[in-house]
Amino acid sequence: MKHKDYYDDKYIALISDKLARAHHQFKGEVFARHLRGKLEGLPLFERFDLIVHALEQSMPDDYTDNIKQLHHLLEGELQTQSGMFTEGWWYWPIGRYVEKNGVLDFEASMGFIKELTKRFTGEYAVRPLIAQYPKRAMSLLIQWSKDENVHVRRLASEGIRIRLPWSKKLYTALDEFESFVVILDNLKNDSSKFVQKSVGNNLNDLFKEAPEKASFIIDNWQRDNPTQTTRWIIAHGTRSFNKEF
């Protein structure tokens, strides 16, 4: 089944029931009326945007309180690294709601995204916050890069990729390069292949935009007697260029 086909009338009934139990002011009948019979045939992100619009019409205008209530929507954390690609698809439009509105409250949004990414990806929701509040966001992501949860650590890397698939380019890695280097340094020996791939992809993106900056990071790592993990990340990060470092 294609991703988009998951978000149909059956999904609307599922998420409506969950929202009704999580948010005491959620108007389920308004939500369903905006969506029922209207998603079929639409591309994935158009479906998301319709769902987000319906959410906005079905909850109060107080974004901060809505996020507080949506915490009640969050269920058990993922038990595997690959789980975000096989489980929790029903969370994606909730993340899209935060992606579109999150700049209204930085702290509430980042707190929710940190919890969301333990259950499904938060990499799209976090990017407008990074763009709007680059220094505050990068400072927090440095902390996340040392978190005990593998999904939070991965988000610290994946969220700041310049060329994240299905997302417009984000250049905070260049504008806040010192903080970017700290994040990748913190993750260059991460025990999780899941995180290692993200760091390598970050380097690969950086090479396409600012090869001198990518080379600067790799040169520093190489002077520091790199571990096998770091060498793997370097190889993954330079794979597009058929170049040995």
Image (cartoon, helix red, strand yellow):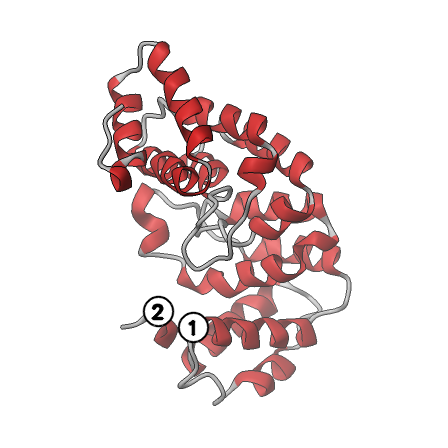
Quadrant the C terminus occupies: top left
- Indicate left or right for 82 with 140 as reference: left
Q: Label 1 amino acid?
A: Leu
The answer to whether residue 201 is seen in the rendering is yes
**Residue 185 pos. (x, y %):** 45, 22
Quadrant the N terminus occupies: bottom left
Q: Are marks 2 and 1 in contact (CB under 8 Å)?
A: yes
**Residue 12 pos. (x, y %):** 49, 77
- Residue tagged 1: 44
- Indicate left or right for 243 with 87 as reference: left
How crowded pointer 2 is (Cα within 10 Å; few <14, some 14-19, many 20+) is rated as few
- Indicate left or right for 138 with 42 as reference: right
Helix, strand or loop at mark 2: helix
**Residue 41 pos. (x, y %):** 40, 85
Sequence-earlier tag: 2 or 1: 2
Residue depicted at x 50% and y 44% = 159
Helix, strand or loop at mark 1: helix
- Residue tagged 2: 3
**How many marks are shown on the rendered structure?**
2
Residue depicted at x 25% and y 27% = 232
In this orientation, which residue lies closer to the viewer: 177 or 56? Answer: 177
**Residue 143 pos. (x, y %):** 56, 28
CA distance for labels 2 and 1: 7 Å
- Which circle marks residue 4 in the picture? none
In this orientation, which residue lies closer to the viewer: 193 or 176? Answer: 176
Q: Label 2 amino acid?
A: His
Give residue 87's quadrant in the image: bottom left
The answer to whether residue 80 is seen in the rendering is no
Relative to 222, residue 82 above or below: below
